Image (cartoon, rainbow, N blue to C red):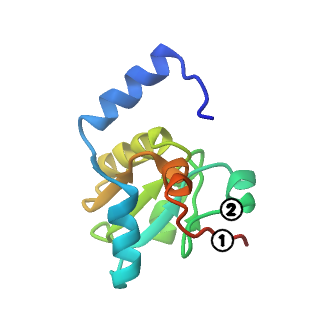
Amino acid sequence: MAPQHSPRFLRIVEDARRRVKETNVDEVKNKIDRGDKFLLVDVREESEFAQDHLPGAIHLGRGIIERDIEERVPDPTTSIVLYCGGGYRSALAADNLQKMGYTNVLSMDSGIRGWREKAYPLTKR
């Protein structure tokens, strides 16, 4: 079950969503199945990532992505899809990456919860 989010948190997420491009789980699954070249980034906490994550995803948690992205992804034109639990943290992270000059960033709406609902494959470390 999705956590109950505070109104202030939801306001900043909605503000970020006005600026970011979003995708959905079906589009991401299709990109993976086609072998499209993009970087899939899980922005959840390390413990969440360790539990399970989308196949091929790397972990750059919401708390460190802005600090570490340039070292991991030096090319700001790299195609990046971010996801989290439900699409909120990934929208916030996408907004900040765009502010840092990354030009090809998508946030996966509904996050891993939506992925699980479709029974798409997950992997562990």
Answer whether labels 1 and 2 touch (C-beta < 8 Å).
yes
Snapshot quadrant of residue 55: bottom right
In the figure, is residue 8 to the left or right of 60?
left
Q: Which residue is mark 2?
A: 52
Residue 108 visible (yes or no): yes
Q: Identify which amino acid the numbered label 2 is placed on.
A: Asp
In the figure, is residue 65 to the left or right of 32?
right
Q: Which mark is residue 123?
A: 1
- What is the C-alpha distance between the residues marked 1 and 2? 5 Å
- Secondary element under disc 2, as helix, strand or loop, is loop
**Up-down relation of residue 62 to residue 106 (above or below):** above
Residue 21, image x and y in percent?
26, 49
**Up-down relation of residue 39 to residue 81 (above or below):** below
| Number of callouts | 2
In the figure, is residue 74 to the left or right of 17?
right
- Secondary element under disc 1, as helix, strand or loop, is loop
Residue 99, image x and y in percent?
31, 46
The N terminus appears in which quarter of the rendering?
top right
Q: Which one is nearer the viewer's eye here, 121 or 37? A: 121
**Up-down relation of residue 7 to residue 1 (above or below):** above
**Mark 1 crowdedness (10 Å alpha carbons): few <14, some 14-19, many ≥20:** few
Mark closest to the chain's N terminus, 1 or 2: 2
Q: Identify which amino acid the numbered label 1 is placed on.
A: Thr
The C terminus appears in which quarter of the rendering?
bottom right
Residue 41, image x and y in percent?
50, 62
- Tell me the residue at 35%/54% (across/down): 24
Residue 45, image x and y in percent?
67, 49
